[in-house]
Image (tube, helix red, strand yellow):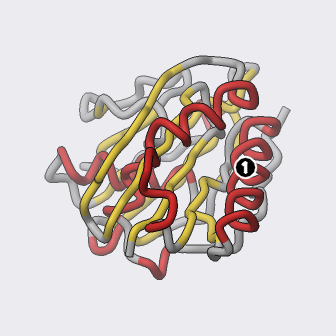
Amino acid sequence: MIELAIDTGSGALSVALIDGDTVLAERHDVIGRGHAEAIVGVVADVVGSRGDAVRGIVVGVGPGSFTGVRIGIAAARALGLAWEVPVTGIGSLALMAAAAFAVDPANTVVAIADAGRGRAYWQLFARDGCRPLTEPAAGDDTTITIPDGAAIAGSGRTVMASRRIAVTHPRAADACRLDRSARVAAVPLYIGAAP
């Protein structure tokens, strides 16, 4: 089943066309700002003439940038209405963990995303099915627990282990690496960071 995948909750504007575990087309651009202005053009570029083949949309729900997450979800919902296809969500930290497991033999990964103002979001995942072992959390770097042997994927200020993987932003194409059971409602996931 061909799906459009979108994640805009970080500095990256990430859009992919996936079919099961295959990436058909992708754009992943670290743009910082301007997601709202660029997303329609990027989707058009990725989808091309295959719009009629899209049977679903999966969108990153965060945690991430308040505005960025909402832009991605709004775009996904609008496209879902126009194409008359279902829209589901996926955790942005799960996308990062899936990318990390694809390149690292670790049994666990801590996915870390920049939450701004010296804070971070993080979540621990197990290799088997990229299963979450903790709920997403937020706070400053000193509150992140890294289990022995775990790899670290993501951005944020922290460089707390030698097993850091070069995954800095959620990549929409990594939705093809996640089981459908990882899908959630397409509503923003907001968690508060400790001051």
Give the image location of residue 191, x and y in percent.
78, 52
Question: Residue drawn at (64%, 76%), measured in percent from left and top?
Answer: 86
Q: Residue furthest left?
A: 105
Quarter of the image that includes the C terminus: top right
- The reply, left or right, for residue 4 in relation to residue 165 is right
Q: Quadrant of residue 89?
A: bottom right
On the question of residue 1 being in view, the answer is yes
The residue carrying mark 1 is: 75
Q: Nearer the viewer, residue 183 or 139?
A: 183
Question: Residue drawn at (54%, 33%), measured in percent from left and top?
Answer: 42
Q: Reply above or below: 55 against 100.
A: below
Give the image location of residue 78, x and y in percent.
77, 57
- The reply, left or right, for residue 192 in relation to residue 181 is right
**Local secondary structure at mark 1:** helix
On the question of residue 110 being in view, the answer is no
Give the image location of residue 73, x and y in percent.
73, 53
Q: Badge 1, how many Cα within 10 Å: few under 14, some, many 20+?
A: some
Q: Reply above or below: 104 against 57.
A: above
Question: Residue drawn at (30%, 29%), measured in percent from left and top?
Answer: 166
Q: Reply above or below: 58 against 169.
A: below
Give the image location of residue 20, x and y in percent.
31, 71
Q: Nearer the viewer, residue 45 or 122?
A: 45
* Three-letter amino acid code of the residue under disc 1: Ala
Question: Residue drawn at (55%, 74%), measured in percent from left and top?
Answer: 183
- The reply, left or right, for residue 10 in relation to residue 75 is left
Q: Nearer the viewer, residue 111 or 148?
A: 111
